[in-house]
Each structure stands twice: as structure tokens, then as C-alpha cells.
Amino acid sequence: MTPRPRPPKGPRTVDADVAVIGLGAMGSMTAWHLARAGASVLGFEQFGLAHDRGASAGESRLFRMAYHEGAAYVPLLRHARELWGELGAASGLPLFHPTGCLSLGLPELPPMRNVRRSVEEHGLDHEILDQDHLAARYPQHLARPGEIGVLDVRGGVLRPELAVLAACAQARLAGARLLDHTRVESVRPEDDRVRITAGGTEYTAGAVVVTAGPWSGRLVPALAGHLTVRPLVLTWFAPRADAAAYAPERFPAFIRDTDGVHLFGVPMMDGMSVKTGFADVWGDLPGPDAFTRDIDEARLRPLGEAVGRYLPGLHPYPVRHAVYHEGYTADRTAVIDRVPGQDRVVVLAGFSGHGFKMAPAFGRIAAELALERGTSFDIAPMRISRLAETAP
């Protein structure tokens, strides 16, 4: 989106052209795009900015364009990488670390086929390594017979907390008013505006973008029953001896599928440990208020065992762990759309643990939907109408 005069959204008496509810990854990026397009922006965050209760935390996140989830995401990922560069340059903060991203597994596995399809269909800069080359280049990983590695050269590591703070700061510099520790109690769309009650005060806006993560279902009834809240558990493991072998210059971010184990990780960004995690093995929560940081040590044991098998140079007991949570859809595809029958309400939700890397692109799409009622990006698979086909 290019900067342009402030658009007329609703009556002149509104508090803002667009309100953004939830200022995590998606909300902060939406506010940034809206404000730099010339819109007046009012943002609400129930916790502090860059808080550690949602999905936009954990010190680091993988960025990859050779995508396990399918080649159709590559155009969005390519645009997101450009925007990460813009935001990093504007803020002066080290948001993106170009470590590369290594996918490991048997070539016939569906995730590995998707990775190869991504690089082939979109001409991505990559290397394919057989087992011998993997052992020589990246001895930190213990490759199984027949496994290959696909190195996404333009992949890397993102800094989630810094990214949220950077986007909020840039939005404020462009005129956005962002209110932290202000919980939204209700959203009431009307013919010519949206009324929002937050922190006991009523506000009005020409349009609203709901980016409230696991809490989105409370504000958008159309999502009720379609978002499942799940914990995100991250763990950090210390090297046994050669710490330099896990530095970003020598150890790319990685994602691995072996023997039914889906393990991801990033290099040693804190100077002492490698972060790893499992996806979708921690069960469901009855709702966002059931979030807890407590996790039994026995539940972490399988992750430590996987690290011991596949990354033998690391101690198989985590030096620390952290728990966050996220909203998931049944098909693990996000919802990005205007709410049917409520043309002034845009919702972004259900990123299912793999949305952060595309957050700047999703924020741009949200801004376009709020200001222009349409977007140049293909979001057909993310339409909210598909949820009606799945019984809640």
C-alpha cells in the first residue's frame, strides 16, 4: 500500500477511521500499514505491548519460503520477507537474521514434497543435500538413512517481541493511537460506524479489524466453535561441548520430520542454548482463560528424547521452557476476511501456529480490506464462509 490521503470511513464524528483490536503480530502490523497509508488508527491491547501470553513471543520464530504447508503460500512469504526488511530498516532493530532454513526428512514425505514443490515452482534459492552431504555440512543433525535436507537459502530467524514493538512504534510515528492494558468488552457494528467498549469507555470507528488471537471468538460470533485454543510449548537445550557449532553462522534454523516426530528449532540466539519445539502435541484448552505456564516435566520428556536422538550434541534436558497459546482452525488455515453481514468488521484469526512469518503481509491485507474493501492478494482459501461447512 502506498501512502495516500486519509480515507473517509464513516461519519466525521468517529474516533478513528479504523480500530484494531489486539496488538500482537497481526494487529501491530495492521496498525502500521493503516497508519502509513494515511488512515487514523485506534488500537487496543488488553495486556502490555509485546506481551508473552499469546503467540507472538518466544524470542525467535522461523522464517521459511520453502514451505511445508504448500507452495501456494510462497507469494505471500516473498512479500512478507520484503516487508520484514522495510520494518527492520525503518526501526533500526535486528528483526530478521538470515541463517537459512533447513528442512530434513525422507523425500517422499508430504511435507518434504511440498518443500521441493515450493522451490521448484517459484525458483527459490536452495540447495538439496543427500545424507552424506548433510553429515558433512551439518554434523549437528543425525540424519537417518535415505533422509535429505533442503536448505532454503533465504530463510532465517525472526525476533517476535522486537517485531511487535517495532510495528507499534512505526504506527505511532505515523499518528496511530495505541492503548495498552485496555481490554475490549464489546464490538457493535452499526450501519455507519462500529461502536467499541474498552476499559469501560465507548469508542467509535469507521471500521474495525479484530486481531485478538485466541480471544477472537469472543468478539466475532461467526468464529464461535471454530477456533480451538492450544498451547505452544518451547524449550531450550544447551550444547554439550562445541557451542560455536550452534551459532547462527553455522547452524541454520530447521524443521524436521522423522519417524513421526515433527521437530523445529533455531540456532543459539541467546549465546547459550538452542530453541526447539514440537507442534500440535500438547492437547487443547477449553479457552484462552485456561492458559497456564505450568507443564509437567514428564510431558517434556519426549521432546528431550527427540533432541537426544536427532541432535546428540545437545544435552537432552531443557535448561528452560516457556508456554504460549494460539487459536487453531480445523483445516489449519487462517481466517482473513470481512465478516458476512458486517461489512465494517474485518477479522484475522486461527493462524494455527504458522502465521507469524507472514504477519507483515497479512497486516497489509487487513489494511486493504478495511480501507478499500478488497485486496490484491488471493485470500480465497482463508474466507470465513468455509467455516460454515464445518459443524462447530
Image (cartoon, rainbow, N blue to C red):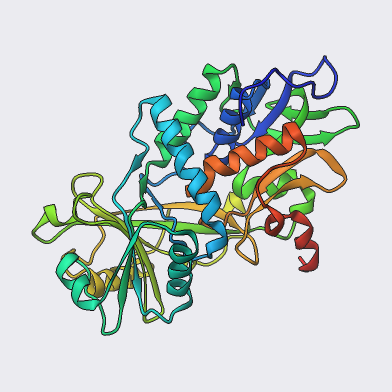
Instruction: Evaluate whether residue 353 shows in this view.
Output: yes
Q: Say how many tags the image has.
A: 0
Q: Residue 94 in the image: x percent, y percent? A: 33, 34
Residue at the location (51% across, 44% down)? 79
Which residue is at the front of the view, 308 or 38? 38
Res 163 → quadrant? top left
Q: Is residue 243 left or right of residue 42?
A: left
Q: Is residue 137 left or right of residue 375?
A: left
- The image quadrant where one finds the N terminus is top right
Instruction: Evaluate whether residue 292 shows in this view.
Output: no
Which residue is at the front of the view, 97 or 55? 97
Q: Residue 238 in the image: x percent, y percent? A: 19, 56
Relative vertical location of residue 162 with respect to residue 202 in this rendering, above or below: below
Q: Residue 168 in the image: x percent, y percent? A: 51, 27
Q: Residue 382 in the image: x percent, y percent? A: 68, 56
Q: Residue lying furthest right in this view?
A: 191
- The image quadrant where one finds the C terminus is bottom right
Res 140 → quadrant? bottom left
Q: Residue lying furthest left in this view?
A: 241
Residue at the location (45% across, 32% down)? 86
Relative vertical location of residue 382 with respect to residue 281 in this rendering, above or below: above
Residue at the location (48% across, 37% down)? 83
Relative vertical location of residue 328 with respect to residue 164 in this rendering, above or below: below
Residue at the location (88% across, 32% down)? 190
Q: Is residue 325 left or right of residue 346?
A: left
Res 52 → quadrant? top left
